[in-house]
Image (cartoon, rainbow, N blue to C red):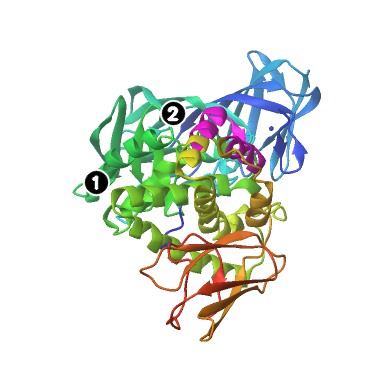
Amino acid sequence: MKNIILLSLCTCLFTGIRAQQVDVQSYAISLNLQDTTDQIKASVSITLKYLQSTRRLKFDLAGMKVKEVFTGPKKYSFEQDANALYINVDGKAGEQGIYTITYGGTPKDGLIISRNKYGHRTFFTDHWPDRAHQWFPCIDHPSDKAIFRISVAAPDHYTVVANGVKKEEVNMGGHMKMTSWEEKVPLATKVMAFAAADFSVTHSGDVGNIPVDSYVFREDSLHQGYARATQILPYFIQLVGPFQFEKLANIQSKTIFGGMENAGAIFYAEESPGHEKLESLLAHEIAHQWFGDAVTETDWRHLWLSEGFATYFTLLYMEHTYSTDTLKASLKADREKIIAFAKRRKTPVVDTTVHSNYMQLLNANSYERGGWVLHMLRRKIGDERFRAGIRQYFRDYNGRNASTDDFRAEMERAGGENLKGFFTQWLYTAAIPELQVNLNYNESTHTVKMEVIQNQLPLFEFPLEYTLDKTKPLQKLMIKDKVTTVMIPAAAKPAGIWLDPDINLLAEFAR
């Protein structure tokens, strides 16, 4: 997702620090929505595989009242607390279970029932990071991916859209309509989604056999900006690999984010259709379809594998579409954001201190700094190896979960070198290089003494590019000590020095 200025703006698996009891295979939700109440009535059939034997099956659930739990004619006793549903079972490791849970209530979060900017009633899911369980029982953690099916009974003036393919739409009588969608690609709960609103739907075009559609509020039907997705999608397919989902729907919504990367059904903020930065927002959320959706981080601490990737691949798209200067300008601006954030909060990109309130991870470390790490990795191993590594990473982890170490191993194979030091200093270290450069010109020897001082701890190791004259070739100096000194021949005293002119180093340069 992206917090742009629209809002100023495991297989042993883990839920938080708990080893999971089960691996969910699918969720099949039946949901009833009404215009006269915010209460919902629903049932969900959960198919799962037991990872360990248990007599007390736990699902995340908050704010909903469970009525009964059953499998066919067999009913199960259960208990609830504020955040979970506990079902008394006799589950054995390796066995499969199917449980149907009927429930209801008024969602406080996760399913947003409200009115759009035109005063019309709308229903939008908004799950990130772990808000799906506010309206349906689930394992609300990115490591547990499952097939998602949903059937929504709603007043017939609504258009209902969700992940996957529309399987059925039938009139029920009484001005009610049932719409069913099915996604056969396993998803994390964070990117499962449905929406019901008075939409105007436009078919923007096809990319190969992938239909690309735009869903906007009827009053915004003249806005065709989402159609740009038909030009962005082919770029990422060519760069990374095949698009994994059955369609790409771009949907105006009530998400709290600038955009939310729901798989094949992306939500964008209400003001997005006419926003001046819509193209980069579209690129960001479409990039997520590979990074975050198809390949999902094992845990929230590895969020940069989603947000940092979407940030940098947006820049790659903009570089491809416009120019390298566009890339440089964006990297320079992002560097300023990273430095400013580091002065407020000293945490590494892979932040192991956050165990709840995951919203705080939506910061410049996960986004811009993660993107910068990819840029420096690209420069370190070269464009060809970088692209090969990215494509292999996607092939190996498509439909699965990956950690930072998983990604590092892929890039080490592609780059042919050990990258542990690189990953340690740029992703697991809170500090950023703070560089002071002193120059002294000796007229008798016609040399410039350049002294580069690292003012931060720990010390970093990296190449520093510089030139004494913008017309001369770049020079590269390896920095690893507290003080690095180099003597540079110069016929005359230079006007100054240009450090990192091509914007390839994440560092703060003393002025």
Report the residue at 32% width, 35% height from top: 234
On screen, 199 above or below 367?
above
Q: Which residue is mark 2?
A: 244
Q: Quadrant of residue 473?
A: bottom left
**The residue tagged with tag 1: helix, strand or loop?**
helix
Q: Quadrant of residue 366?
A: bottom right
The spot of residue 172 in percent (x, y) is 35, 24
Circle 1 packing at 10 Å, graded few (<14), some (14-19), many (20+), is some
> Closest to the observer: 315 or 216?
315
Give me the C-alpha separation between circle 2 and circle 1.
Answer: 29 Å
User: What span is in magenta?
Assistant: 390-413
Q: Which residue is mark 1?
A: 218
On screen, 191 above or below 284?
above
**The residue tagged with tag 2: helix, strand or loop?**
loop
Is 151 positioned to the left or the right of 64 in the image? left
The spot of residue 244 in percent (x, y) is 44, 28
